[in-house]
Image (cartoon, grey):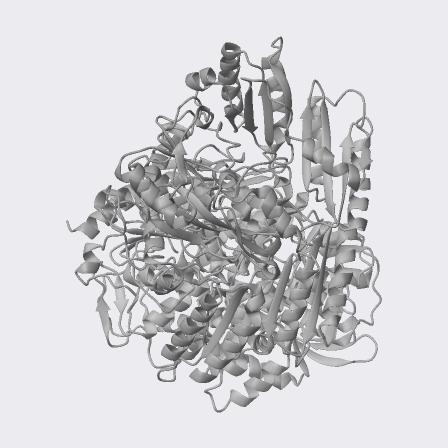
Amino acid sequence: MDRRARLVRRMEEALGAVAVVSERAELRTYECDGLTSYRVVPSLVVLPESAEQVQRAVCICHQEGVPFVARGSGTGLSGGALPVEDGVLIVLARMRRILEVDIPSQRVVVEPGVINLWVTEAVAPQGYYYAPDPSSQLVCSIGGNVAENSGGAHCLKYGFTTNHVTGLEVVLPTGETVQFGGKALDTPGYDLVGAFVGSEGTLGIATRITLRIVRKPEVVRTLLAAFVSMEEAGGAVSGIIAAGILPAAVEMMDALSREAAEAAVHAGYPAGAGGLLIVELDGPAAEVEYQFGEVERICHQNGCTELRIARNDEERVLMWKGRRAAFAAMGRISPDYYVQDGVIPRTALPQVLRKIAQLAAAHDLRVANVFHAGDGNLHPLVLYDGAVEGQAERAELLAGEILKACLEQGGSITGEHGVGFDKKRYMPDMFTTTDLATMQLLRCAFDPDHRCNPGKVFPTPRLCGEVPGPYRVHPLEKAGLAERM
Amino acid sequence: MADDSHIPAQARAAAQSGGARRPADTVQEVGVASEGVAAGAVAAPRGGFSILPAFDEHHPPSFQLVEECVHCGFCLPSCPTYLLFGEEMDSPRGRIYLMKEALQGEPLDGAMARHFDLCLGCLACVTACPSGVRYERLIEATRQQVERRYRRSVADRSFRALIYQLFPYPARLRLFTAPLGLYQRSGLQSLVRRSGVPARFPSRLRSLEELMPPLSPRRDTGVPVWTPALGSERRRVGLLLGCVQRFFFGEVNAATARVLSAEGCGVLAPQRQGCCGALSLHAGREAEAMRFARKTIDCFEAAGVETVAVNVAGCGSAMKEYGYLLRDDPQYAERARQFSARVRDVSELLSELGPVAERHALPLTVVYHDACHLAHGQGIRAQPRELLRQIPGLTLHEVPREREICCGSAGTYNLLEPEPARELGERKARAVLDAGAQLLVTGNPGCHLQIQAALRRLHRPLPAAHVMEVIDASIRGVPVDALVQWPAASRRLAWPGAGA
Amino acid sequence: MDVRLREIVGAHVWEAGTEDAIDGVQPALVIEPGSVEEAAAVLRLANENNLAVAPRGGGSKLGWGNPPERLDWILSTVRMNRVLEHAAGDLVVRVQAGACLRDVQQELAGAGQWLALDPPEAEGTIGGIIAANDFGSHRLRFGTVRDLLIGITYVLPDGTVAKAGGKVVKNVAGYDLNKLFTGSLGTLGLIAEAIFRLHPVPASSRAVVAPQSGAGMGAGELGGAVQSILDSSLVPSALDFEWREGGRLFVLFEGVETGVTAQAEAARQLLDRRGGAAILEDVQVRPLWQGMGRPQLDRNGTRLKITTPIAELPALITCVENLAAGHPLVRTMWGHAGSGIAYLDLGADEQPVIALLAELREKIAALGGSVVAHAAPAGVKRALDVWGEVGTALPLMLAVKRQFDPMRVMNPGRFVGGI
């Protein structure tokens, strides 16, 4: 029996036929995640329904020497769930139970397939919520959030997934199950919870996740301010930070992204604004009232042409609707688009925007900009038409150059989408070979056989030996078989 | 009659324990191209049936529309089959991907056809999609291809034949309903149900038995051909009587005519009318749907009405698409377009006209359930709620969760795919119960039957009524008890102008 | 050896004295590199010669951890003590590991900002704070090191100098080694530089103390009071407790004047039912919080850090009370009630302390928490691992250690599981 047939049989025996997908047409529906530029058909897809089944699946992969990739809802934007050829794709979408809600200790324990928004929905009646709120929160999974250390518009004030995970149960690539952390803080030993979150599925599969929930703020106040240009909007943000105010969220949209969002959801954004600012403050009423007044003043000081304050929840939701739909809405003003994700020190925004405009002009393409102004996370959306010869390549080139511009200012190649497959090639621009090699020491401890989501994050795999010493070239690289991208 | 004894026991068990994951496939014919199937059919290696190319030249799903999907996945949480099975292939994103694969050269085989069949056609994904993908066009075109090209199993074909030879034909339904009435009124039905025997029926038969409502005593004599407007006539409307609606929910038609009349509409219910073709259209039976559409257009054109009012969500949705359906027919294309422009759901129409008839108090709490073909298919959500809120003393509750998820009725889905339908029905029933209302109100007979069957299975019956029945009760000052205890009360109701 | 060391650090190496011993283990030399490169060269030398090295900043937390298996050199960071860069507009600061926290805060205050860490150990350096995961009362609102550290430069024992994270708050490129090094007690390498995110210094503060006088609250009552604050929409900067045969709660509010006044009043009302609550003004607040967390520990006393799920505070108190019944051992208990962290000081009687600690560990484990000794006499440390059980993750932690420090140069034996 050939290896694949044996693999199918073993998986069916261990998980049930209903959990195994092996037909080609069906396998192809899993060939990419939210990033469609790369596609790889997995050899097999399995859908375990319990931690125990995950463990069995990983054990089988380990025994058969087969690489595997974990996937949640498949909405990631860096190709983190891109399958490996001849590998198994382990889909966690059926593990979607909320296992425990413990309000007094402010913890919720979930399976990895639980949708981000469901966590908030589970604790909302008691007045709590789960703070990390990526725009895709109605479909992205907690497991995926853990892998990517997802943020969201409110991460400036509240932090990222890693600040809200206190415990993990993980199936290691060897098939063992281990526990990191728990409901209590500061478990003795290395902070493996912290090391695992954001490791993009390269260290193991989380099968149980203990999350921290927070109390809903007393008040939330949101305003929308229109400016003639992004510069002025940026100036307002600087003023807000300088005044010692830490908003819950500060979002900026340029004219093009505003247009697209308006076309998609009709949120009623002020037409003609060169820069749009959404500022949200939350917290105790008296404090927010005072700070809100300051924010208004600062906006006016920086030349805002129109200022709207949300009078109720509905208006607030509408203000956000456009921002949240911005990416998908690009489909309305352009046949294709490439979402870039870079970070810059906030104070560098004006220079970077100027540079982006220059680069865009040079490549003869349009770029829409959506910016998490509070934390410096920039999302340039490179618009192109794939049907026109060469445009897709130009778009990718432009996106890469924009990223380099971010790095030039001391930023990062990714604020929230992760490195995955897509940005491996930029890692050497941000980190030295030594940095990357020493990071991979961690990977060697978890996955010495390099079978857990291989080919992601690091451009060149490190040789995992017990031998100490500086970085040594992997034999595959030497043989010219692995590319340094 | 369909029987699922051919389904492997393991798969059946898996389907019934803890809910269907991937419902048991019907066994495929070992593929041999037969006469009536398009050239190019090939036998699939695993003993199934597979055809290449997947689609023929007649209106395949548009590649351009397929390309509009950016693969963001925002549709997944609103898809009932993704909710149940958690598999990409049974999500809108995955189905679109399968269509793309097929357009790019993958054969149409059993697995692929199955995923298309499992789509409920609820169109919740269309509402959810931020990129505006026209999934309704895509699934319609794909279903037509599957109907034309894919060879289903004998059992499957027979069962479908039964449904489509019966439901769209009033005369045949009348013949069928006679013994059915006896079955119900003689007490035999309750005996059968109490005995627990249906649990041992094959799944589809069991489904049919469970869904059967009490036969309407009024049947198709419920609505006269002509009902004048009370007071001055504001609009001349034609009323579609429906098929299942006519026989099982005659009261609803009667109530609809009364309400329209009370609101100043002259109501013409042409006797000759037949099926509007919705069931056929949504199942991909294109030629059949077109035939029904033409007849319906002819019938209502002859009636010379300004507006065609429909009180069945699925029918209204289909009729609004006649323009698209008959776009290739030179004789009907323009007529169909104009016809479609005159179709209104009754709640939509009443909202347009604005109320004139006095509403009497109906102190009760109701929970309103959005039928998919009203909410997603026609964008009609506000109007029924508006109408209900106009009734003094009535408190409107919303279904507290999974509001956008289909109840599982989806036309004939609950007959063809009983396991997922049952699970969806149960989810909806529980959510409806949690709304804590005295009456379930909806705008579609299918939803009515489906949710009531699910409530019965939970031993938590809840009365249900159509929006029009509630408004009718309010206009005529019918007491709450009478409304809530249908059908007993209905026999006491006087039909204005027709004698008691 | 000495020659090679002098080549690297010049005159900044000398013989260790008894005051340089860690838990009675005497090193030979104390070395003070002046730069990352010098530190790297020193470590490389140690690695090549199979020596054991303990990094040291202010030396305030050297008692944390088990006694070292062996110890040859102390690698002191006191000369690497500068603030390298303060980007006030971006709320980010980059410092060398040997900088004293107090000095860093002073410099940041010039721009109205601060690093939101307030550990009681006053002479702590940045490197030590990171390595020990040291924190104070403000953890409730701002988190601990792991929530504030955004970039790190570290030196591996083999002399490799590498960095992780970056200068921006939002960054998911690569593995989060910031977290791995936090609390690693210097067993993976030397932390050389760190980059933190900052917060604005609050304009005003108020504190609420309950009960303001008289006997303290019972355990259950204290737990209820904590829950009432946590469940309200108040946003305290700190929620601390003290237990001395009765509990007292301290709530700190910081922010704009109107905000803190309103919140303090709301908190006072919530807590008033429980024996009266008092509001303290700005001026009184600082000394109160500075005094917290610094009771005097008996000579040869043991200080325990106990973490539990937040709601288990009453159970913890009851457990300690029961165990301590009759023992004059237990001195005081205090902690950060809003985070589920408590500290317990025990007297100098070794055998009973060992017995009590063993039993306490069992009970706390059942509650889902852990007990770690931050200070203990040699006898206690010999009998019991200060860290306690680690569970299923230990083999993995050993594997991580093997990757970063295969020759076991860095603080051998001081960490969990004998790492």
Left or right side of A142 for C234: right
Image-quadrant location for residue A156: bottom right
Q: Which residue lies furthest to the left in this view?
A: A1
Instruction: Depth check: give the residue in front, A116 or C277.
Output: C277
Instruction: Depth check: give the residue in front, B170 or A352.
Output: A352
- Is residue B23 visible in the rendered image? The answer is no
**Quadrant (top left, top right, bottom left, bottom right) of the C terminus of chain A:** bottom left
Q: Which residue lies furthest to the bottom in this view?
A: B330
Instruction: Depth check: give the residue in front, B148 or A161.
Output: A161
Total count of labels: 0
Residue B289 to residue C225: above or below:
below
Left or right side of A296 for A343: left
Instruction: Depth check: give the residue in front, B436 or A242.
Output: A242
| Residue lying at 34% horizontally and 74% vertically, measured from the top left | B103
Q: Position of residue B440 (x, y in %)?
A: 67, 54
Q: Position of residue C204 (x, y in %)?
A: 76, 47
- Is residue A168 visible in the rendered image? The answer is yes
| Residue lying at 73% horizontally and 77% vertically, measured from the top left | A305
Image-quadrant location for residue A256: bottom right
Q: Where is residue A182 in the image (x, y as percent from the top left)?
A: 50, 35
Q: Residue furthest front?
A: C11
| Residue lying at 43% horizontally and 78% vertically, measured from the top left | B287
Left or right side of B252 for C58: left
Residue C356 to residue A44: above or below:
above
Q: Where is residue A254 in the image (x, y as percent from the top left)?
A: 59, 75
